[in-house]
Amino acid sequence: MTASMLALAVLVAVAYGVQTVSGFGAGLILVTLGVHLVELPTLLALILPLSIAQTGWITLRHWRAVDGRLLLGKVIPVMGAGVGLGYLVAAQVSGMTVVKQVLGVFVVLLAARELWQLHRGTTPAVGTPIASTLSIFGAGVVHGIYATGGPLLVYGLGREGLDRARFRATVTTVWLVLNVGLVATYAVEGRYTPHRLGQLLVLLVGIPVGVAAGERVFSRVSERAFRWGIYGLLAVAGVPLILS
């Protein structure tokens, strides 16, 4: 085991611990910090199967909390349509960092608004169906271009009035579906050599550690603390986009 793989395994445990609590955030943490340990193409090929392991476990264990009506009736078709559009326009805008920066500013402002309401003691209002749908569609477009649609998806689902258990289970299932598709694509491309599979086995050790710690924290946080964490992470998620 190399020093970089050992450090990445520790980072995996932390990142998926955070995602087990909040339903998202592992990709942000791993891509932002892990790229200093491993080249980005290799990093993506490693963390996506790990994501399937974590999201698959959470989905299997908490499937009763998944909002199937919202997932199948809205998120998958609307976000899927957005991803399709994103792929069509990717060649025209993928090199335009200003698109990422505008998205980052937008996400930070939305998160700041929600955090301000929480600070004032105002319960965040459930968004209109149109606002939620546009956020989810926008998440698909951005995901199709940059594979960074998470912030908009989380904001869109956050406006659906889900409690923390349904929110976490539903958004986790979305990541599971998306990442299964991406890993299948990587496998067809031949990215999973025997050496890469050996690295995956090393990093996989961090998943049960992170999940166990995350489940313990999740069982102890209040609904209000959960919302603080969700929108705080969204604010953080926008910063790398602004600085890209």
Image (tube, grey):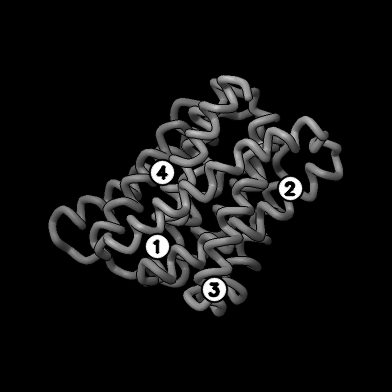
* Residue identified by numbered label 4: 106
The residue labelled by disc 3 is 63
Q: CA distance from mark 3 to mark 1?
A: 19 Å
Q: Nearer the viewer, mark 3 or mark 1?
A: 3
Q: Which residue is mark 2?
A: 183
Residue type highlighted by circle 1? Gly
**Distance (Cα) linking label 4 and label 3:** 32 Å
Cα–Cα span, label 1 and label 4: 15 Å
Q: Are marks 3 and 1 in contact (CB under 8 Å)?
A: no
Q: Nearer the viewer, residue 23 or 92?
A: 23
Helix, strand or loop status at disc 4: helix
Q: Where is residue 68 shown, x and y percent of the image?
A: 56, 77
Looking at the rendered structure, the secondary structure element under dot 2 is helix
Q: Which residue: 86% across, 44% down?
A: 188
Q: Above or below — where is 41 with respect to 234?
A: above
- Looking at the image, tell me whether mark 2 or mark 1 is earlier in sequence order: 1
Residue at the location (36% across, 71% down)?
Answer: 163
How many neighbours does mark 3 have within 10 angstroms: few (below 14), some (14-19), or many (20 or more)? Answer: some
- First in residue order: circle 3 vs circle 2: 3
Q: Dividing the image into 4 quarters, which one contains the N terminus? A: top right
Where residue 22 is drawn, which disc sits there? none
Q: Nearer the viewer, mark 1 or mark 4?
A: 1
- The correct choice, above or below, for 207 with respect to 197 in the image is below
Relative placement, left or right, of 229 versus 65 is left
User: Which numbered dot is residue 158?
Assistant: 1
